[in-house]
Structure formats: structure tokens, C-alpha cells
Amino acid sequence: MMEEHKLPAPMVALLPVLLLIILVALSILLFGGDALTGASQFALLLATAFTLILGKVSVNSGWHKFETQLIKNFKNIAVALFILLIIGGLSATWMISGVVPFFIVYGMKLISPDVFLVSACVICALVSMLTGSSWTTVATIGIALNGIGQALGIPVGWIAGAIISGAYFGDKMSPLSDTTIMASSVTGTPLFTHIRYMVITTFPSLLITLIVFLVAGFNTDQAAFSNSEVFEKALRLKFSLSPWLLLVPVLTVFLIVKRYPPLVTLFISMLTALIFAVIFQPEIIREIAGGGKDSISMIKGSMMTVFGSTSIDADNDTIKALIATKGMQGMLNTIWIIICASCFGAAMTSTGMIESLTKSLIRHVHSTTGLVGSTVLTGMLTNLTMGDQYLGLILTGNIFKKLYAQKGYESRLLSRTLEDSVTVTSVLVPWNSCGMTQSTVLGISTFVYLPFAVFCYLSPLMSIVIAAIGYRIKKEKPDLTGYEEN
């Protein structure tokens, strides 16, 4: 936990959060979909400055504390920033190589439009459980499913909602997931005890989610499904769709199963897809380079595919938009907003604003429902203010760890509640690393998919409902051994 110091009053601590919400709303009002290309980042920095000034005036918080916390935050997100760059290159090479178009063409034949949303959710859930990563799932099979859904004429909000719901279910339940491991370790809960206990809230949430997607699928406009033939014809004309392209995802899965580090796995997958692009789509690579038949054009086009934006000519404007890529360059706004969000999170933490808000919530805890509800609200608050789910898991876990022990609750209740709140709601916040990443990869605004990411807002609600029912929640004699604050 943070070192002891005077805390600002809860109403004072709430002011930076309210200011940030107002500034972000103003950014969206003024700039619309372009708000995340600079306006929202500026809003975060203004809120950071306001927080530091308020902290200095109210509790005499020093600059050194902010710098120390900022360095700690940057250290925690450093690897994630590199992963983001690689994901930008990965999504581009999987598209240009023909891997994603291959999945789109044959996926349209295999998946019925009526059950597409359910299928997309289940497929992403399985892949995410295998990989342990929602980011990798969305950047690979998620992009392909996004293309299939658009080809079938399904609204993009529903498509992204199904992909994200499945990906975050798998991320939450996989023993390979960083967030699953972190939630169990920060609370001192054995990993598989944590996973088994999550089943109680997670599977009902998934079942309701699938029912919602099933109903939505059967109510989709059937006339739109005729687009699929147009998409297939256009993609076959533009890409060489060889079955050999499947070697790229097969290699990726192999590396994941062998537990190679995410950076290594994604980088090798990106390079392999780039080699396949040169072999199977040489004309497209030359087109990206601006023409030319020599080897220099191939090298230039290959490099541009990885780091830059590409726009490939197609007869259909929808197809042209679908196969356009942004590469690593497209992730720079995401990295920019994550850095700014980390600054705001450091300011809120170093000045004691988050601790003040949390202690205010804890003060009114008199029941299991109140305790779980306070944890859920704190977890969601950290996603709004810290800009990164890992920081949210660590901070929320450390804040509540001792309280759960003092009241005699098992650590698994806290670890489950952390996942039900922090892990799955991070993707709903536009300036959070998860929300910004998935929005960038799928090319769909966070605000567009937010209402349709059913699983992500059912999970925290289900956590509170189960707490109110009291199902399999044991309360024992308080035992503080091993529950010292970090």
C-alpha cells in the first residue's frame, strides 16, 4: 500500500474524475471520432495538472511522489507498449499476406449469418483461453471475424461486442492469462482455486451473453446477407488464397502452446506473415510500394506494410476500407493515450485521491454485498483513472486485501471480484490501454461497441448479484496471518 500521509477529502478527490469526464465529453462533442487522436490525450494531461495542483493545495503533496509513481507506472506498462507496436504490424501482415482474407472467404461459407454473433463469441472465447491473451485473440482471429461479419452485413457494433465478449471471457478464465495470474497472486489465492471460483459468476454471465447474441442474430436484416458473394468475389480477385497461408496461424498457435513470451510469439508471427505476403501477394506488395518490378520495390512495400498505413485499390469501397491497414504507425495514438492515462493515474495515486475515494467507500461497508460492491466500484474507478488494467488489479487488490481478511472472507472472493470488475471493464474505457487497443485493432470506436460488449458489463453485475445471494461465500474467523499490506 501507499505510505501513510494525509488524504484529501472524498469530495475533493472526486473533482479530478469529474473534470476528466467533462473534458473527455467535450473532446468527443468537438472532434467526434477524432477525439482519440489528440483531444482526449490533452484532456488527460489537463486533468493530471489539475490533480497535482489540487493535491498540493489540499494535502501539500510533493512533486517527488508524483515522479516516483510515474516511473513505477511506466515500468508496469513498458512491455505492453512494445506489444502494441508488434500487434500493429501483426494485424497488417496477416491482412496483406492473405491470411485474414482467407478466413473471411471460407468463414462466410461455414458460419450461418443467423448464429454468427454466437459463433464469433464462442470462437474468440476458445482462442483466448488457449492463448491466454485477449489482445492476441482480437488482433488475429478477431480481425478475421470482423471481416466476415461485415461481409454478412451485420452491424459493426454487434460484431465487435461479440468478439470482445468472447476474448475477455477466455482471458479471464485461462490459466495462461497475465490478468488471471496477477489477480490470484496479488490476493494470495492458488491459481486453480481462483479459476474454479470464477465459474460461479463467469458462466452465468456468458450464458446470458450468448442468449442476447442469439436473439440479435435472428433479428438481423436478412437482405444484408447478399453482400457476402460480392465480398468473396472481390477478395478472390485481389488475393491469392492458398491453403498454405494457414501455416501462419498454425505456427502462432504452436508458439503459444510452447509458452514462448508474447513479444517473441507475436514478432515471429508477424515476420512469417510478411514472408508469406511476399510469396503469395507480390503484386499487392508492389502496389503498396507505389509500383515497380524490382526487388527494391518488394523491400520497400514489405517495410511499409509493417510500419505504415496501406490503402489497396478495390472495386468495392467497403472492401477497400476492410483491407486497409495502419501497421505500427496506427498504434501511436494508442501508445500516446496510454502514456497520458498513466500520468493521470500517477497523479491520482501520489496525491492520495484514489485512496481517499476508496476509503470513503469502505467506510460504509457493513455486508458482503457492500464489500463486493465497493471492490467492483473501486476496480472500475481504477480503470477510469489509472489507464491500465494491471495497475488497477494491483492497486485494488492491495487496498482490499487486508479488509477481506479482517472480516473473515476467503481470498478467492477478492480475486474473483477483481477479475469481474477490473479485467473485463478495462476494454470499455476509451483511454484505458485495453479500450484503446481493441478499438484501434478493430477500427471501431469504443463508444460504438460499448453497448454490445454484453459480457463485459454483465460480469461486475453478476459479481454483486451472487454476493447478495451469498452462494458459496464462506465467512470464517478473521485470520490476518500473511495478509500484511504490501
Image (spheres, helix red, strand yellow):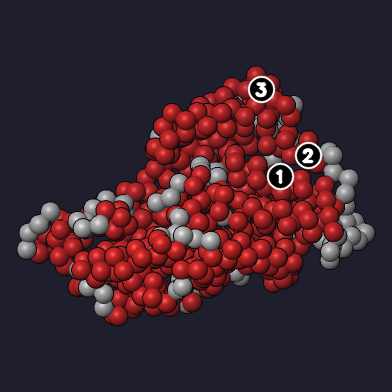
Is 170 placed left or right of 108 in the picture?
right
Q: Nearer the viewer, mark 3 or mark 2?
A: 2
Q: Is residue 204 left or right of residue 101?
A: right
* CA distance for labels 2 and 1: 9 Å
Question: What's the amino acid at mark 1?
Answer: Leu
> In terms of image quadrants, where is residue 141?
bottom left
Q: Residues within 10 Å of mark 3 (few under 14, many from 20)?
A: some
Q: Give the SS element for disc 2.
A: helix
Q: Residue furthest bottom?
A: 243
Q: Circle 3 sits on which residue?
A: 60
Residue occupying the far right of the picture = 477
Residue 189 visible from this viewpoint: no
- Residue 214, how many percent across, how many down? 58, 66
- 38 over 315 or under it: above or below: above
Check disc 1 and report the residue beneath it.
377
Instruction: Name the residue beneath numbered marker 2.
Output: 361
Contact? badges 2 and 1 (CB < 8 Å): yes
Image disc number at residue 87: none
Considering only vertical position in the picture, is 113 above or below 359? Answer: below
Locate the N terminus and report the quarter of the image it occupies.
top right
Query: Circles 1 and 3: CB distance less than 8 Å?
Result: no
